[in-house]
Image (cartoon, rainbow, N blue to C red):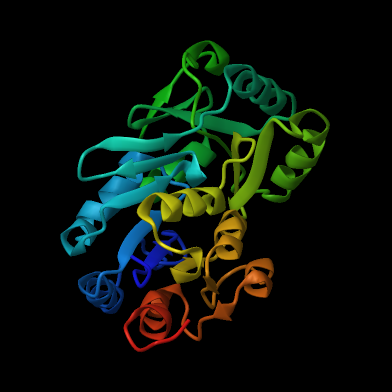
Amino acid sequence: MENRKVLFLDMDGTTLDDQKRISEKNLEALKRAAEHGCEVVIATGRTNTSAGRVRVSYGLEQIGCRYMIVYNGAAILDCETGRLLFTKTLPMEYAKALVDAARREDIYLHTYVEDSVLTERDDENLTVYLQRTGMKARIVPDLKEAITMSPYKMLAISVRNPDRLQMFKENQTAWTKGKVDMYFSSRDYLEMVSEGVSKGAALRMFCEWMGIPLENSVAAGDESNDLSMLKAAGVGCAVANAQTEVKQTADYVTEQDNNHSAIAEIVEKFVLPGMAF
C-alpha cells in the first residue's frame, strides 16, 4: 500500500480538451498508470450522471477508473458497485435562501434532481449549460417549492456578464460564512456547496480510506474549485491553460495545455515507476 499512487483528475479544462474530448495520448498514459497500480480518480464539479457519461464514453472505466468525486466533493462514488462512499448535501434552508438571493439579484440559478437540471429560468444560461454537459432540464414555476431534498450543490451562471457572479458572491458573505462555501469552476460558473465541501477534503478522505499516503497522491486542475485539491495532494499540478491563481498554487505547471495532452505529461513525470515525486 505504501508504494501505491493515486491520480485525481479534474475533467473540464484539464483532462478534457475544449471540445470535451479525451485525447488518445492522455488515455494511453492513464491506461499505463492504471496498469502500474495507480488509482485513477475523476474529481469534478459535474454530477454523477454527467461525469459517469464521460467515464464510459471515453473508456476510462475500461482502464480501471472505478471511483469518482462529483459535485465538487459533495459525493464520492464507487462506480463498480454504485455505492456512495460519502455524501454531504446543502441544507434545505440554505438552498432556498440562495434561490431568494438569486431572484433579488436577477441571477440564473439551478440545482439537480436525478439526471436533470432543476431551474425556474429558461434562458441562454441554461441553453449554454445543457450544450456543454449534454444534460436535460426540468423547468419549474417555483424552484424553492421544487426543492424537496437537500441538494448536493447549486450553480449560478452568467455567460454574458460573469463579473456579476463575483458581486453576487460578495453580497452573500454576511450570511453564508460557516454555512455555504462558494467558488468558481469557470469564469461563468459559481458553485455553491455545504460548508467544508471541496475536492481537497474528498481527496484526503479517499486517500485515508484506501490507505494511500497523501504524499503518493497527484492532482491536476485548472480552476478555482481545484485549488483545495492541488493544495491537499502530494503533488498539485496546474495545466498550462489554468487560471493564474491555480498556477501560483501548484507544485508544477505543465508545458502542455488541455488541448495538447497535459495529463500525459503529468503521468510521465509524476506517476509512472522510476519517476520520483
* Residue 238 location (% of width, % of height): 55, 72
Left/right placement of residue 59 relative to residue 190 reads left
* Residue 6 location (% of width, % of height): 38, 65
* Residue 140 location (% of width, % of height): 46, 17
Q: How many numbered callouts?
A: 0
Quadrant of the drawing holding the N terminus: bottom left
* Residue 51 location (% of width, % of height): 34, 48
Residue 128 in the image: above or below residue 91: below
Kindly identify the residue that appears in the image at 42 percent across and 66 percent down. 18
Kindly identify the residue that appears in the image at 58 percent across and 22 percent down. 91
Name the residue nearer the viewer: 206 or 17: 206
Looking at the image, can residue 134 be seen? no
Name the residue nearer the viewer: 202 or 183: 202
Left/right placement of residue 198 relative to residue 169 reads left
Kindly identify the residue that appears in the image at 71 percent across and 25 percent down. 101
Q: Residue furthest front?
A: 2
Looking at the image, can residue 205 be seen? yes
Q: Residue furthest bottom?
A: 274
Q: Residue furthest top?
A: 145
Q: Residue furthest left?
A: 62
Kindly identify the residue that appears in the image at 32 percent across and 84 percent down. 273
